[in-house]
Every structure is written in C-alpha cells, then in structure tokens.
Image (tube, rainbow, N blue to C red):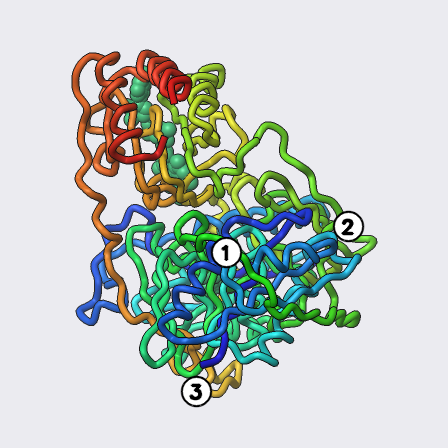
Amino acid sequence: MNPILVFCEQRDSRLKKVGLEALGEARRLAGGAGCEVVGIVIGASIASLAEELARHGASRVLVGEDPGLTRYSSETYTAMLGDAATRLQPVAILMGATAMGKDLAPKLAARLKTSLAQDCVALQMESDGSLLGTRPVYGGKLRAVVKAVTPALQVVTLRPNVFSPIEPKPASGIPIERLALQANPDRPRATVRDVQQTAGSKIELTEAGIIVSGGRGLKGPENFKLVEELAAAVGAAVGASRAAVDAGWKPHSYQVGLTGKTVSPQLYIACGISGAIQHQAGMSSARTIVAINNNPNAPIFKLATYGLVGDLFEVVPLLTEEVKKLKAGS
Amino acid sequence: MKIVVCVKQVPATESKLQLTTDGTDVNRSGLSFVINPYDEFAVEEALQIKERLGTGEVTVLSLRPHADQKPEEALRTCLAMGADKAVLLSDQAFDGADTFTTALVLASALRRLSFDLLLCGKQAVDDDGSAVGIQVAELLGLPHVAVVNKLEINQGARTVLAHRQIEGGIEVVEAPLPALITCQKGLNEPRYPSLPGIMKAKQKPLEVWTRDTLGLPAETIGVAGAKQRVVRLEPPPPRPAGRIIGGDAATAVKELVRLLHEEAKVI
Ligand SMILES: Cc1cc2nc3c(=O)[nH]c(=O)nc-3n(C[C@H](O)[C@H](O)[C@H](O)COP(=O)(O)OP(=O)(O)OC[C@H]3O[C@@H](n4cnc5c(N)ncnc54)[C@H](O)[C@@H]3O)c2cc1C
Ligand SMILES: Nc1ncnc2c1ncn2[C@@H]1O[C@H](COP(=O)(O)O)[C@@H](O)[C@H]1O
C-alpha cells in the first residue's frame, strides 16, 4: 500500500502539536492498512525536528530545509509538497487545520487535482484503502462523511486537539531525506513581509486545552477581568462571544463561533453567553462544556456538561478561588 | 480597478435542516437563503475600494450550487448594495459540484471577465469547505492571501498588502495584482442595500451563463467531475446528557470543581 504523507507544521523551529496529532492518526490508519507514514517538515532551521517526527510515528522523514524559508510561503510549500506527492503517490496527505494548513491544503489539492476535506474530526480507512473523512458542515449542525472519488488521493486537514499523538518512542535509524527546494521563480506569489505577535493572547485559542469565554452577560469590558482571572487560575485561553466583540470589549481574534474561531478544547467555560447557534458552531466539539448563566432557559444549557444557573458576578470569582485552592492542594 | 467578487447563496444560518431521503444532502425546498456572510464582507470591500479610488467596476459572480436555489436573488442584493453588474452561472451540469469543480467552473468564467482583483469569502457556511477561493487562484495561476481582515491596495505598484490572523499573531502578506483575497470578519461592516439602490439594481445587467457559454466538457464539472463524494450527512453525535448543578453558589461551585477534577478529569 502506498504511504500516508503527514505535513508537520513548524513556526520558528517549533512543531505545532496538531502535526504530532496527525502523525499519531496516520500511524493508527496505517496500522490497519499496512502502509508507511512519511513525515514532512519544511522551513529554515529545522534539522533537529526530523527526529521528533520519527519519535512520534513517522517511519521516514522528508526535510525541506532552506535558509530562505524562515516564513511560510503558500507557493513554495505547495510546490515542495506537490513534488513529494507526485513521487510517492500517497493514499492521503494529512496536516493540521491551522491557519497554515487551511491555506496550504486547498492549493495543494487543486494543484494535484484531487479531493480535499478540511477540518476533519474523524478519519477511517476503508478496506479498499480509501479514506473516509468526517467533517462538521452547516456550522456544526451536521457532519458530512466524505470520500475521494476512487482512486484519487485525499488531502485532509485535521482539527487541532481532536486526534491523539502516539506515546513518543526512541527512533534511531529512521531514513531522513532532503526535499529539494522547488522555487518556480516564474509564478507570481504572495510573500509574507512581516509576522506581528498579537499582544495579550498568551495561549492561542485554537490550540488551547481549556478556554474561558465571556459574553454580553459580563455587561462591560471592565468585567472581562473576571473571565481573565478564572482563565489564569485554570491555565486557559480567553474567548468571547460575538456580542462581546461587536460591543468592542475584545478584538475579533477572541471571537468564538461561526464568524470567529472554531475551537475544540478539553474544557470550555461559557460565562454570560446565551449559546446562540452561531456561537455553538465554534465550540460544540469541546469535550466538556460548563455554562454559567442566570437564565435557566438559555440554549447553552442544552449543550453544557455541567450547568450552573446563577449570577456570574457571584459565581465566577468563587470558581476562581475554588480552582486556586485545588491547584494549591495538588 | 476591476474587481470580481464570488458570492455564494447559502441557507440562512438559523435554518432547520432536514436531510434528503438518501441522506447525502440537505433538503432545500422551503429553506430561505442569504448571501454567505463572508461574501458580504467581500462585496463591501470591493465597493469601498472602488469608492476610495474613485473609479472602477465591481462584478459579482455566483454559481448556482443546486437546482432548488435562486442565486439571482443574492446577486440582485449585491447590485442593490452597489455592485455594477452580475453574472450567474446556472446549468444542471454544474449542480452537485464539490469545492474543486466549483472552483473549476468559477475559474473558467473568470477567464472571460477582466479583473485586477478577485475577492471571495473565507468559507461558505453551508459546506464549510474553506477552499474554493484558494483553489480558484491556483487554477488561474494567481497568488492568494486567505482569511484577510485588513487590505491595502497600492495601485501604483500594482500590489496588495493584506493582514491575516494566524495562531498568536498576524501575517502581513504582499502579493502582486491580479491576486485573490479571501475575506474574514473584521475587514469592514457590510452596508445594507438602500431603497434607491434597490430601485437601481433592477436596471443593472445580470447575465446568465451556462455550460455552453463556458464550453466546458460535461464530464469535468458538477457531480460528474467532482473529486469528492458525500457518503452521508449525519447529526453530530449527541452530547452526553448534561446536568444542572443546584444549591447556593458556594456549594455549586465546590461541586463543579470536584466534578471537573474527578469526573471529567479536565482540571
Ligand atoms: C451570520 C451570523 C454570524 C454570527 N457569528 C457569531 C459568532 O461567530 N460567534 C458568536 O458568539 N455569535 C455569532 N453570532 C451572533 C449570535 O447570534 C448571538 O447574537 C451572540 O452569540 C450572542 O452573544 P452573547 O451570548 O454574549 O449575548 P446574549 O445572547 O445577549 O446572551 C447573554 C447571556 O448572558 C446571560 N446573563 C446576563 N447577565 C448575567 C449574569 N449577571 N450572570 C450570568 N449570566 C448572565 C443572559 O441570560 C444571556 O443568556 C452571529 C450571528 C449571525 C447572524
Ligand atoms: N457556488 C459558488 N458561487 C460563487 N462563489 C462561490 C461558490 N462556492 C464558493 N464560492 C466562493 O468561495 C468561498 C469559499 O467557499 P467554500 O470553499 O465552499 O467554503 C465563498 O465564500 C465564495 O466566495
């Protein structure tokens, strides 16, 4: 059986967790089908990352290293991955559904004239080697199970925090090959001129294991500190509903939902958020959901694993204290 | 500056969805449809660029995704917002497209239009494909910048400078024109069509192009050419029944923390 390719994104020589999750999932899929898992990493100073890929399940690693690749380039990455795919004829190409992955995967799929499934939350290998991808559609109201029209290959992005990496194991003697830089200087290209760190967001929402979000129930921007204190206590990222963002309490990068970010944390705590369908679209795949709301009929309670009907101005500070106590004790 | 905006008509986000009998699609009869919210940002941006530069032309382009839809309504709304002309791609042969064949047909139509800038939404909120814009650019051999929430046009240098959100930051990307941009919330506040706008829209040209117009072989497009098939649609797995934690706030909070620690094991 032909291999599964896994593109593992790095930024500033650090691998994204979702790349390791994709390797773990590829291993699981390959186990059934008996095919090779080829990890690919592209960037500037990345030689040391090859072994990390091997330890997380790659049986072979391709390294596209070039000093000119300090920043992402959709054109160069597509050319390099496209070249690898043409040579190795994989059954599937997996990568994380990150800003980079969601940008790269469609371009790559179009260049290879093949099927694309973005933001998958489950994958399954059929006995004939075709890959079924399950992905939320209609803002999470439905899921589509999709399949490449045979015998085409499938390009797949995986939602972060959903799949499990393997337990890392020593990996010596794994073949590591250089991937030639595909320059294509003739193609017009988009060039990243600058990368600006956003101030304040210590933990990125889409990667966070825990998120505490605030909504209109907070009544004003100054009260977001209640949410932030709780977030600091549990080690969470801070999110917001659209109502809170539209009111100018938080920038759009905090927004969770249909027109914001899709998140999939282990724990999502919604404070003063009603749980409109468009908000749910961004967070309904969270493992555990806690709702704090003073209206027992708020739709968020239909989704919540644990619901607390009460005044957030009373409940949230208590919760912060209780979490601090727990952390201090453990 | 000539700008073409790709606009998809999608079921209103509040729609109650029912599946077709074979379970591979949504039953569209009786649904109400709207302009894909991200495409509204794209239309607004095109209009603002034209207004800023004081010259230009904005064309809106829509491919009918399904026989039960009438995207001409969405196009008329765009014309009422201020777009100059509209092209509707409508043919049974286009129906049932996946993102690739959608991009293929749009790209083929775009080859017949002249443009300096192409704008799409970052995602259509029905199939949530997050692909078509980028794929159109690739098929046309154009650079793209995706998920953009700030856009500057440098007409003299014929370049665009776009901001896009990435994890923990912003990527500032430059591309030569013609280029394709996919639009994200934050870019602008879409306007509502004005009453005079709605009146004027009735006089504006709306052309309908079919497979014959584009001269595309039937086997390469629509469901026939699709690279991907929907095996089935299903509701998301039901969430395990939740529970309301009662009692006074202090007791309830203690119980919540215990459950999060011992039962859910998330803190
Ligand atoms: C096309 C479209 C896209 C959209 N995209 C998004 C999106 O991406 N994300 C998003 O979030 N929304 C989105 N929305 C908006 C969505 O429909 C809701 O309007 C929004 O989510 C409401 O935000 P909220 O829950 O903070 O506010 P509200 O709905 O006003 O809810 C506030 C909640 O706080 C509770 N509350 C008030 N005071 C207290 C208190 N003292 N203690 C405890 N609880 C209290 C109330 O009971 C209420 O349930 C979109 C809408 C449309 C049409
Ligand atoms: N049928 C269509 N007609 C016109 N534009 C479309 C169509 N489908 C997708 N698009 C464009 O591509 C974007 C992304 O769509 P998607 O990849 O389906 O999420 C949309 O926001 C539109 O700008």
Q: Are marks 3 and 2 in contact (CB under 8 Å)?
A: no
x and y percentages locating residue A96 in the rendered image: 50, 56
Which amino acid does the dot numbered 2 rest on?
Asn
Is residue A193 toward the left or the right of residue A293 in the image?
right
Residue at the disc numbered 3: B219
Q: Do the dots labelled 1 and 2 sit on one chain?
A: no
Compare marks 3 and 2 and give the one earlier in the sequence.
2
Q: Residue at x 37, y 56 (%)?
A: A121
Q: Residue furthest right?
A: B156
x and y percentages locating residue A55 in the rendered image: 54, 57
Residue at the disc numbered 2: B154
Check residue A143 in the rendering and tell me which mark sits there, or answer none.
Answer: none
Q: Nearer the viewer, residue A296 or B34?
A: A296
Residue at the disc numbered 1: A169
Image vertical order of residue A96 relative to residue A310, above or below: below
The disc numbered 1 marks a residue on which chain?
A
Q: Nearer the viewer, residue B18 or A237?
A: A237
State the quadrant of the N terminus of chain A: bottom left
Q: Residue at x 59, y 67 (%)?
A: A174
x and y percentages locating residue B26 in the rendered image: 26, 63
Q: Residue at x 68, y 61 (%)?
A: B179
Mark 1 and mark 2: span between their CA atoms?
A: 52 Å
Which amino acid does the dot numbered 1 rest on?
Lys
Query: Quadrant location of residue B59?
Result: bottom right
Which amino acid does the dot numbered 3 rest on?
Glu
Mark 1 falls on what kind of element? Answer: loop
Q: Is residue B104 visible?
A: yes
Image vertical order of residue A32 relative to residue B35, above or below: below
